[in-house]
Each structure stands twice: as structure tokens, then as C-alpha cells.
Image (tube, rainbow, N blue to C red):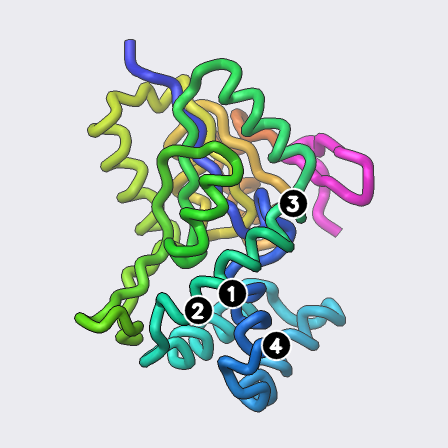
């Protein structure tokens, strides 16, 4: 019998926003990046989402594109202070349900993994804060001078997360049927499907629609919505309004 694991997405599942976006904002605040780069398409997609006219994942993808381009040429050591500040100032801005589940899994001696589209250099600090030994985030490549090259190995899509879990499964002898996964977007779909105990936390509409079309996933998944200081468990056959 293999090990039991718990796989957690971070942005939107544990952290109540995006670590990448928080880092992006801090780089602008500390004038490492020119504030003008926020204006234009990024601001437009943010405002559309903020007014509930647009799609959250579209907003994330647009900001990710600008962020990756803006990081090119920056020295990692130079921005380490800002990176640490993101976790120091915002690391507690998490969902209570997810934080408690991480603690529960630790107490059960389960293997806990963070698998996230967040930059690996941010995710590593978040993992340290929550005593998570195993993690896999988006890798931002560096040149010989420790400058960002603008090249990445993404970890925000479903296929990449699925491959990461498959690798962890073999390396740590994980029993997937007895294991858990927690996510909130369509990028977490395969991760949720591959375990015996999937949990969708504040799921986006695209993910909910996929769940409703997949009878096996619909049967075994738990839907959680956390708003203010109340945590709700939603039936999978509840209508989408």
C-alpha cells in the first residue's frame, strides 16, 4: 500500500489571489518596474473581471504575459527582498478552509505538495511558511549572471500539473486512490480527476461546468465555497445561476 498525498494548488485555492500578481504589484510599488506597464490590456482585463464582466483566467493570463516580459533582464538577487516581502506581508492572506486542511494532512502524516502556476522562487517561500516540503511551480530560467531570461517552464495548465503529479507518484510511491487534491480553476482539472478525494475550492464557472459533465468526477468531488467567515459545502447537482 502506497503513501497518501495531498496536492494543493496555491493561487486562488490557498492564497486568496495570485502570488505572481502580488509580486508584480510590489515590483511596481518599489519602482523596479515602470507603472506604465500596468496600463492598457492588463488594466482592462482586470477591470472587466473586477466588475464581473470578464473571465478571471483571462485576466491572469494577460498579467502573466506582461509579467514574464517585464522580468526579462532583472537580477534575481536584486529583487529577493521584494520576493520575501510578498510572503511576509501577504502570506497569511489565505482561505481558512485550505489552511486547516494543510494542517490536518500534516497531522495525518500525509505527504503534502504545492503544485502551482506561481513562480517557483515565490512558491518555495510560501511552502516554507506552511511547512510544505514538496513543491513544483513555474520555473523562471536564469542566465549565468542570475538574470531572468524571459524563458519559463509553465505549471499553470492542467497537462503540466498532471505530469508533475505523475512524477511525484512514481518518486514517492503514492496511492492516488487514497490521496487528495485541491484546486479552483480549469488548470486543476486533471489534478482533481486523478485522485480519489478531489476538492474544488471557490471553483470558477469553467471548472464547475466540466465537473457537471464528468459523472465520475461529479460523484467523488467535494465543492467548497468560502465567503467572509462562512464555509459552505455545495451539492454537485446544484444549479449554476
On the question of residue 237 being in view, the answer is no
Q: Does the magenta stretch include residue 226?
A: yes
Helix, strand or loop at disc 1?
helix
Asked whether 193 or 176 is in front, the reply is 176
Mark nearer the viewer, 3 or 1: 1
Distance (Cα) linking label 1 and label 4 = 10 Å
Distance (Cα) linking label 3 and label 1 = 16 Å
Mark 4 nearby-residue class (10 Å; few <14, some 14–19, many ≥20)? few
Q: Which residue lies furthest to the left in this view?
A: 144
Distance (Cα) linking label 2 and label 3 = 21 Å
Distance (Cα) linking label 4 and label 2 = 12 Å
Distance (Cα) linking label 1 and label 2 = 5 Å
In this view, 41 is above or below 147 = below
Specify the segment rendered in magenta: 223-241
Residue 79 is marked as: 2
Residue beneath the point at 39% across and 76% down:
71
Q: Does the magenta stretch include residue 147?
A: no
Residue denoted by label 3: 92
Tell whether label 2 touches label 4 (CB within 8 Å). Answer: no
For marks 3 and 1, the one nearer the N-term is 1
Residue denoted by label 4: 29
Where is residue 208? Give x, y as percent. Answer: 59, 46
Amino acid at each position: 500500500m502506497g503513501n497518501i498525498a495531498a496536492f494543493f494548488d496555491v493561487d486562488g485555492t490557498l492564497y486568496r489571489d495570485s502570488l505572481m500578481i502580488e509580486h508584480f504589484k510590489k515590483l511596481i510599488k518599489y519602482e523596479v518596474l515602470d507603472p506604465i506597464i500596468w496600463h492598457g490590456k492588463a488594466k482592462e482585463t482586470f477591470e472587466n473581471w473586477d466588475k464581473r464582466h470578464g473571465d478571471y483566467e483571462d485576466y491572469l493570463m494577460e498579467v502573466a504575459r506582461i509579467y514574464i516580459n517585464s522580468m526579462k533582464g532583472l537580477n534575481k538577487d536584486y529583487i529577493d527582498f521584494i520576493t520575501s516581502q510578498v510572503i511576509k506581508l501577504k502570506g497569511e492572506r489565505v482561505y481558512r478552509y485550505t489552511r486547516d486542511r494543510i494542517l490536518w494532512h500534516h497531522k495525518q502524516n500525509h505527504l503534502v505538495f504545492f503544485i502551482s502556476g506561481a513562480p517557483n522562487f515565490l512558491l518555495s517561500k510560501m511552502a516554507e511558511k506552511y511547512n510544505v516540503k514538496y513543491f513544483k511551480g513555474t520555473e523562471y530560467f536564469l542566465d549565468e549572471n542570475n538574470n531572468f531570461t524571459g524563458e519559463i517552464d509553465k505549471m499553470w495548465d492542467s497537462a503540466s500539473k498532471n505530469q508533475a503529479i505523475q512524477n511525484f507518484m512514481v518518486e514517492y510511491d503514492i496511492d492516488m486512490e487514497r490521496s487528495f487534491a485541491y484546486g479552483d480553476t480549469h488548470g486543476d482539472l486533471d489534478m482533481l480527476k486523478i485522485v480519489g478525494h478531489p476538492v474544488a475550492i471557490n471553483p470558477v464557472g469553467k471548472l464547475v461546468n466540466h465537473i457537471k459533465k464528468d459523472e465520475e468526477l461529479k460523484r467523488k468531488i467535494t465543492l467548497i465555497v468560502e465567503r467572509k467567515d462562512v464555509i459552505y459545502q455545495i451539492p454537485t447537482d446544484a444549479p449554476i445561476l
